[in-house]
Amino acid sequence: MSNIQPSSEPLPAGWLPPAFNQGWTYCDRPGPGLARGTSVASYYASRYGHSDRAVWLGRIAAGEVHCNGHRLLADGPLAAGDRLAWHRPPWQEAAVPDLPGPLFDDGDLHVIDKPSGLPVLPAGGWLEHSVLRLLERRHRGDSAGLPRPVHRLGRFTSGLLVCARQPHTRAWLSARLRESTAQGPSQAAPLLGESCRKLYRALVVPGLLALQPGESRLIEVPIGRRAHPQLGQLWCAADGSAPGDRSAPGDRSARSTLTLLERGRQADLVQVAIASGRPHQIRIHCAAIGAPLLGDPLYAPGGQVSPGALPGDGGYHLQAWRLELDLPGGRRLDLEAPQALALAKDASVGSGKPLVHHDWPPIPIAVRQD
């Protein structure tokens, strides 16, 4: 059941109201490392820390869990290789901003300005209220095909999201967008060359960066998975600075260049160029150097996860602001988000003015043929 409560507040213009989906089926198959005598409910509780064994027993009793194609009527022993399926009933998804029209569309490549608060892909509590599902509904039946996201942005990250209709285009673009991530943890990932350049803007806690406006800092803190009490593991800084932390085989090299653009009383505005596409990289890297994103509930100074916070928690301002990409056939795509993240010029402590504004004039989209 949904725990979303009705609100008397009207939705902002351009938002989709809360709506029930059709439910979803989550499939699992225990591996050979399953302990002898493990029950279905115990397996689920150990694998998914968000629900304890009692909750899973209730789901089994409600007939939501199947094993090897048969509905379970009670908890029982589980064997390695058994096929589990949890048929989650329909639930209500919260209101989200609607998907805007494309900034650029050449019949294959499709770039949108994703609003903050809209998930890119179905996951967790989101199915129908996601970029992918909204694109499917909007472009169902299009002769050119369905545009699908090539990469991800966090739910509360706004800005340029690249999609493509043709599978070969998605594969090519995906390679370009991650081309600098092929190095192993011991290798330094070079900054993206002229073929692809991604720039982000963010607000960070003010006064913590030892930089003057216009100065830059290179950040090369590795990123890896570490234990989390609710989700098992989460991505965070993996540089050994946390007590008891040691490098792990799955740790990944990561490289960002942060430039301080402007100082403010309530926030500092930074630009970040990323040379690798690690999960939550900008949030982790800013926190790792002691200047976390303003309002970020998940990553504390040092780049470690704050207890009790989850990746889907919002409150921060991060924007995929600019993309420069060489396209096949000698074309080059230069795009900027129409409204750049910026400090509000009249914001001051106690003034009641917003920390940010988005009223910069639209930036023209340029596609040039060399």
Image: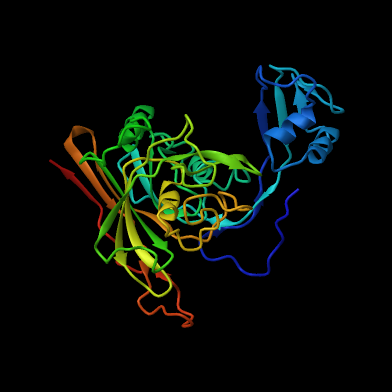
Residue in view at x 80 percent, y 41 percent: 55
Q: In the orientation shown, which residue stands out farthest toward the left? A: 370
Residue in view at x 44 percent, y 65 percent: 205
Give x and y (percent) for residue 73: 87, 27
Give x and y (percent) for residue 194: 20, 41
Looking at the image, residue 293 sits to the left or right of residue 130; the answer is left
Residue in view at x 34 percent, y 30 percent: 182
Residue closer to the observer: 257 or 44: 257
Q: In the orientation shown, which residue stands out farthest toward the front? A: 244
Looking at the image, residue 249 sits to the left or right of residue 19; the answer is left
Residue closer to the observer: 348 or 99: 348
Residue 59, by quadrant, is top right
Residue closer to the observer: 18 or 289: 289
Is residue 308 in sight in this rendering?
yes
Is residue 87 in sight in this rendering?
no
Give x and y (percent) for residue 168: 35, 27
